Amino acid sequence: MTGLLIDAREEIWPLKEVFRISRGSRTEARVIVATISDGEHIGRGECVPIARYYQSTESVLAQIESIKREKNLDRHLLRKLLPASAARNALDCALWDLEAKISGQRVWELANIPIVPEVETSFTISLDAPAAMASAAKENRNAPILKLKLGGDELDFSRIEAVHAASPAARLFIDANESWPREHYQKFAPVLKQLGVELIEQPFPADADEVLETLDHPIPICADESCHTTADLSRLTNRYEVVNEGQGEARKQYLIDGTQRLQIRGDPSGANADGAVYAKGSLWLSRGNSVVRVNPRTGNVLHRYAAPSRYLVFADGAIWAGEPGSGATT
């Protein structure tokens, strides 16, 4: 696209309550809002600079400023101009939004990604004393999933117990934000399932997560800080069962790159999947005339189903495969 006008500004939104994780706390959200206009349509995107990745309001605005005068800017050129970062995420979102408005299509249509009528999301409970987290859980007991921020100290197990007691029907995800030592994991992981915990997110620091290859996984482990772009995926093998798509750059790269070619043991040709979804403890890949169910830890093919499909969706407790409207299921 030529002649684009790019603008960016900071917006500061006070939070209703202090939000804490293992690395610190905040009382406001500092958001960079980017807009890109062709003179008729305006695309919008945003990002939040994160200090853990050496990002600041000033550094993000400087990155956006550096490409303002670039001619023929589009999503593909943007990847060459800026590294994976908060700034690139905001601009990439704005370019998708602009393209959608110009074409009269939704972003998911442009990206050729199927959607489902509704998705299940989790409600995050900030790191706090066990009683305070239990109170927050009780207030949000109707949420289908509660995600608990933990701190890596000896109160973590008490926090989980308190939340489970306050909301016994809730499914629980826990997020340590890289704060757990190995001993912490070995002590707590085997008994967490009894308290309704279904997922452990980023227990160890991203630069020390190789320990996960030697530990048992009684509960699926989710990568967050360890995965930012598709280039990170190969090293996650045998360490994680799930990737947190909330990590903006990783998710945006999925839109750009398409499905990564996966090397499946016992299948020398690799998966080269058209679609992929993690559900029921397995990785499901659609390819040509079949759907392949794979053990995400070992890479072993567990089963093959005859189901011509380009799309996979997990809904109503089943894997749905096929062309839009085909109604096929495995």
Image (cartoon, rainbow, N blue to C red):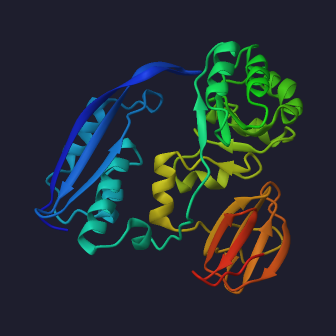
Above or below, 194 against 86 in this view is above
Quarter holding residue 211: top right
Quarter holding residue 316: bottom right
Residue located 47% across and 20% down the image: 17
Residue located 67% across and 85% down the image: 288
Residue located 65% across and 71% down the image: 312
Above or below, 281 against 202 in this view is below
Q: Front-most of 232 and 330?
A: 330
Is residue 295 shown left or right of residue 64? Answer: right
Could you tell me residue 209's position as x and y percent? 70, 36
Residue located 62% across and 26% down the image: 139
Quarter holding residue 225: top right
Q: Front-most of 262 and 25?
A: 25
Could you tell me residue 155's position as x and y percent? 74, 14
Is residue 140 shown left or right of residue 49? Answer: right
Q: Is residue 151 visible?
A: no
Could you tell me residue 162's position as x and y percent? 76, 20
Q: Front-most of 28 and 142?
A: 142
Above or below, 151 against 61 in this view is above
Could you tell me residue 242's position as x and y percent? 69, 50
